[in-house]
Image (tube, grey):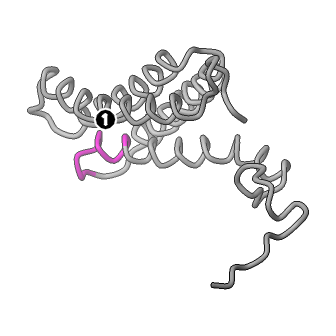
Amino acid sequence: MAHAAPATGAVTRYGGPPRLFSERTHAIARWAVPVALGLVYGYWAAANVRYGGPITGMNVLFGFVTTIVFIALYLGAQALAPRLPRELHAVLWASFTGITIGFLFSLSGRGHSVLASTVLALAFAIPVGIVAFYHYYTHEDGTGHRIR
């Protein structure tokens, strides 16, 4: 049987995943993603608070304050997370996810209890924590340093 000859040069060396975007694009995305997510989250929270009623000035203010708080917490978690060991790194993102989902759920209806919000927050946080831990665990070398 005939086999293809191995190629020479950089084609056969594996240097990690291909770099599709430039460093500038990544720098812009580091700010654009939290802002976009914050705007969606703030709009969603403001829509939950008004319960289908008219949009008021206080409703718009609540949406913008929620957006600013979300962006600040997201950027804080984004800055703190790489300095943590993988277990705490996963717990940080799991708790962030659970808190944000629980807060939105608590705003969504007048009859929801704190217990229902907590259960829903845990229902989202636990799978996110497991997946995050798996991701961080599989992206480290034998000594626990992240592979970049």
**From this viewpoint, which residue is outermost toward the left?**
111
- Measured from the top left, where is residue 33 in percent x and y? 62, 46
Residue at point 45%, 39% (across, down): 63
**From this viewpoint, which residue is outermost toward the bottom?**
1
- Measured from the top left, where is residue 97 in percent x and y? 39, 32
- Measured from the top left, where is residue 88 in percent x and y? 49, 15
For the image, the number of numbered tags is 1
- Measured from the top left, where is residue 93 in percent x and y? 46, 27
Determine whether, in the image, residue 63 is placed left or right of residue 25: left
Q: Name the secondary structure under disc 1.
A: helix
Quarter of the picture containing the N terminus is bottom right
Res. 50 image quadrant: top left
Q: Which residue occupies the foreground of this view, 86 or 43?
A: 86
Q: Quick check: 41 above or below 90?
A: below
Which stretch is magenta? 45-53
Q: Which residue occupies the foreground of this view, 76 or 13?
A: 13
Q: Which residue occupies the foreground of this view, 65 or 3?
A: 3
Residue at point 28%, 30% (across, down): 102
Residue type for callout 1: Pro
Q: Residues within 10 Å of mark 1 (few under 14, many from 20)?
A: few
Determine whether, in the image, residue 20 is placed left or right of residue 50: right
**Residue 50 among those drawn in magenta:** yes
Res. 18 image quadrant: bottom right
